[in-house]
């Protein structure tokens, strides 16, 4: 679908926005809360902007996964379990998103983001030690939770990174660099499934999607580098300020 052409200036702006969003998506989440309003402002209908945004998310995660793999912080088997668990939910959410209208839950999401941010910042004091997150009961709890995360991710995706980090922080009790590596693999798997659905429904604008993907791919690579090099403290500080800024934006955005 290419009924909404981009000029050169708009293409450059969208690519730059993509770099910022890709970086945020990998180290914290919420990048889609920037890209979706920008594409809508540029003239895309909300449902097409929502679908088109997934092309950028897909490619951004490819670059981020490559960087995490090189750094040796990937738990491939666990990520695959959670990613596959999210796929059915994501397809359900994506099906509902095809005819999405308005931004009713943006204010609800802004509150959720603040709660998630507070819990992440308190993570070290809330963790229970001595559990095996990728075995037994904890694994099945993760599979169930990620089905529902998939529903939300498939529906709109915006802010899903915050939710994934919260859940993985409780389950994995791992450094945020490793948690972020699981997050991007899970997001890649269920986003790939949702893109197939949106292709079938013909609601993707490829000019916008590929332009944004160039930016988010660069941002995703930079974000994974930052996540690995800076460690928990700096990621959590960035996450906190990202949540505050995006929550205020969400609350007042119409």
Image (tube, rainbow, N blue to C red):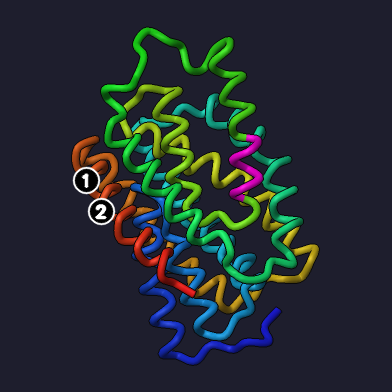
Q: Position of residue 97 (x, y in %)?
A: 70, 60
Give the number of the disc on residue 183.
none
SS assignment at label 2: helix
Tell me which secondary structure the magenta stretch mostly adopts.
helix
**Badge count:** 2
What's the residue at 24%, 35% (across, down)? 232
| Along the line of sight, the residue nearer the viewer: 205 or 246 | 246
| Along the line of sight, the residue nearer the viewer: 222 or 47 | 47
**Would you name the residue on which mark 1 appears?**
237
SS assignment at label 1: helix
Instruction: Sort mark 1 into few (<14), some (14-19) or many (20+) by Cα contacts within 10 Å.
Output: few
Q: Position of residue 175 (x, y in %)?
A: 31, 29
What's the residue at 47%, 43% (across, down)? 184
Q: Is residue 9 left or right of residue 57?
A: left
Residue 152 position (above or below residue 51): above
What's the residue at 74%, 57% (across, down)? 96
Q: Are marks 2 and 1 in contact (CB under 8 Å)?
A: yes
Residue 231 highlighted magenta (yes or no) = no
What's the residue at 69%, 66% (across, down)? 100
Q: Is residue 83 left or right of residue 92?
A: left
**Would you name the residue on which mark 2 appears?**
241
Magenta residues (range): 147-153
- Residue 157, picture quadrant: bottom right
The CA span between labels 2 and 1 is 6 Å
């Amino acid at each position: 679908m290419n009924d909404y052409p981009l000029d050169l200036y708009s293409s450059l702006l969208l690519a730059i926005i993509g770099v910022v969003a890709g970086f945020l998506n990998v180290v914290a989440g919420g990048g889609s809360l920037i890209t979706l309003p920008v594409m809508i402002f540029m003239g895309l209908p909300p449902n097409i902007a929502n679908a088109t945004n997934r092309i950028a998310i897909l490619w951004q995660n490819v670059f981020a996964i490559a960087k995490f793999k090189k750094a040796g912080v990937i738990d491939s088997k666990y990520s695959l379990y959670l990613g596959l668990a999210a796929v059915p939910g994501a397809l359900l959410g994506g099906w509902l998103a095809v005819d999405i209208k308005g931004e009713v839950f943006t204010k609800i999401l802004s509150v959720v983001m603040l709660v998630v941010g507070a819990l992440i910042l308190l993570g070290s004091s809330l963790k229970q030690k001595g559990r095996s997150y990728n075995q037994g009961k904890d694994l099945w709890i993760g599979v169930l939770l990620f089905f529902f995360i998939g529903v939300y991710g498939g529906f709109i995706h915006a802010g899903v990174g915050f939710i994934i980090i919260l859940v993985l922080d409780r389950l994995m009790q791992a450094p945020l660099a490793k948690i972020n590596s699981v997050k991007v693999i899970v997001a890649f798997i269920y986003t790939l499934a949702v893109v197939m659905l949106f292709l079938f429904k013909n609601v993707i604008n490829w000019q916008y999607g590929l332009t944004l993907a160039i930016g988010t791919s660069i941002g995703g690579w930079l974000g994974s580098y930052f996540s690995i090099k800076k460690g928990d403290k700096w990621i959590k500080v960035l996450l906190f300020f990202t949540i505050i800024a995006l929550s205020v934006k969400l609350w007042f955005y119409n």
